[in-house]
Image: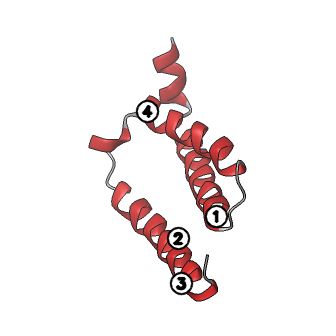
Amino acid sequence: MLERFLLRHEQSFKNLALILGITSTVAIVQNWYPLNLFLSLPFCLIWIAMGWLHSERQLKWINILFTGFYVYGIGRYMVLGA
């Protein structure tokens, strides 16, 4: 029953996970603690429920996107200083 629900709403969960991932990364980069924790937890739970790690080609592109956010954060840290 839960599996059928997840399969029926898979695309919606993927879109929600992408939004949560982007906003939690921005929260980390902007140091909006603890907002990043509240955004990251549902992101992780969706990834666990969907089991995307072995079946999604778009994972590569999502990781590239998140890498860009982290590079921005490191660059911001280096320019502005801690």
Graded by Cα atoms within 10 Å as few (under 14), some (14 to 19) or many (20 or more), the crowding at tag 4 reads few
What quarter of the picture does the C terminus occupy? bottom right
Identity, as a three-letter code, of the amino acid under mark 2: Phe
State how far apart marks 2 and 4 are (Cα).
22 Å
State how far apart marks 1 and 2 are (Cα).
7 Å
State how far apart marks 2 and 3 are (Cα).
14 Å
State how far apart marks 4 and 3 are (Cα).
34 Å
Identity, as a three-letter code, of the amino acid under mark 3: Met
Residue 69, label in figure: 2
Lower sequence index among marks 3 and 1? 1
Q: What residue is shown with label 4?
A: 48
In the rendered image, residue 39, in percent from the top left (x then y), is placed at 65, 46
Graded by Cα atoms within 10 Å as few (under 14), some (14 to 19) or many (20 or more), the crowding at tag 3 reads few
For the residues bearing labels 1 and 2, Cβ distance under 8 angstroms? yes
For the residues bearing labels 2 and 4, Cβ distance under 8 angstroms? no
Q: How many marks?
A: 4
State how far apart marks 4 and 1 are (Cα).
22 Å
Identity, as a three-letter code, of the amino acid under mark 4: Ile
Identity, as a three-letter code, of the amino acid under mark 1: Val
Lower sequence index among marks 2 and 4? 4
In the rendered image, residue 45, in percent from the top left (x then y), is placed at 52, 33
Q: Residue at x 48, y 19 (%)?
A: 4
Of badges 3 and 1, the one in the foreground is 3
Lower sequence index among marks 2 and 3? 2
Of badges 4 and 3, the one in the foreground is 3
